[in-house]
Image (spheres, helix red, strand yellow):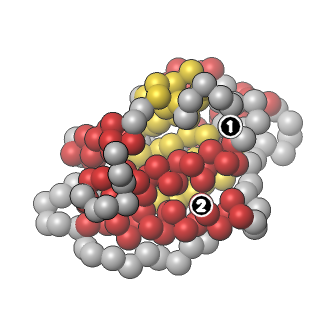
Amino acid sequence: MNGRPAARGPEPKRGLPTMRVHICAVGRLRKGPEKALLDDYLTRFDRTGRALGLGPANVIEVEDRKGGGMAAEADLLRRAIPQGAVTLALDERGKPMTSPDFATRLADWRDQGRGDLALLIGGADGLDPSLRDQADALLSFGAMVWPHMLVRVMLSEQLYRAATILAGTPYHRV
């Protein structure tokens, strides 16, 4: 898991569905500035998202130590995805979204009663095409390729931003 302390915040509103968020990623994020940023944004997301029925968020890291390539990484990621979870794969071929669109997508899945959201981040070579094809949706952070460790930080910030948009707080400015 992510080793962060449990976030404290308001309890979810009664009757609001809850959707847990799982960042399923290839590779291990070691101590350093990226890890500190990831933990900070996920803690913020947990605090803000709780009252919205979003979260908690956790990070599930997988690592192919046998050198099986993208196919082996895909198998490890598949095992990390909670049963019945909606899957959103981060991929350069995916659809770019605005932050408000991303927030709306999360709220829609939550409101549909989806109990788990798995956000998939591949390794240095990306996601295996078979896993990408199985995803419910594909998300791109633009035409540029980003380091897979930095994508975790960018994704965690967007999760927090989505929660603030849904909560109507001033963090997000259009």
Q: Measured along the vertical axis of the image, is residue 154 above or below residue 90?
A: below
- In this view, the residue farthest toward the left is 15
Q: Measured along the vertical axis of the image, is residue 4 above or below residue 153?
A: below
Counting residues from the start of the chain, the first of labels 2 and 1 encountered is 2
Can residue 106 be seen in this snapshot? no
Along the viewing direction, whichever of 160 and 9 lies nearer the viewer? 160
* 49 to the left or right of 78: left
* 94 to the left or right of 105: right
Find residue 61 and report its horizontal and vertical position in percent: 66, 53
Along the viewing direction, whichever of 77 and 31 lies nearer the viewer? 31
Amino acid type indicated by mark 2: Leu
Question: Which SS class for mark 2?
Answer: helix
Image point (35%, 51%), residue name: 173
* 163 to the left or right of 139: left
Quarter occupied by the N terminus: bottom right
Q: Measured along the vertical axis of the image, is residue 62 above or below residue 42?
A: above
Number of the label disc, if any, that sits on residue 38: 2
Which residue is disc 1 drawn over?
146
Disc 1 residue crowd, few under 14, some 14–19, many 20+, Cα 10 Å:
some
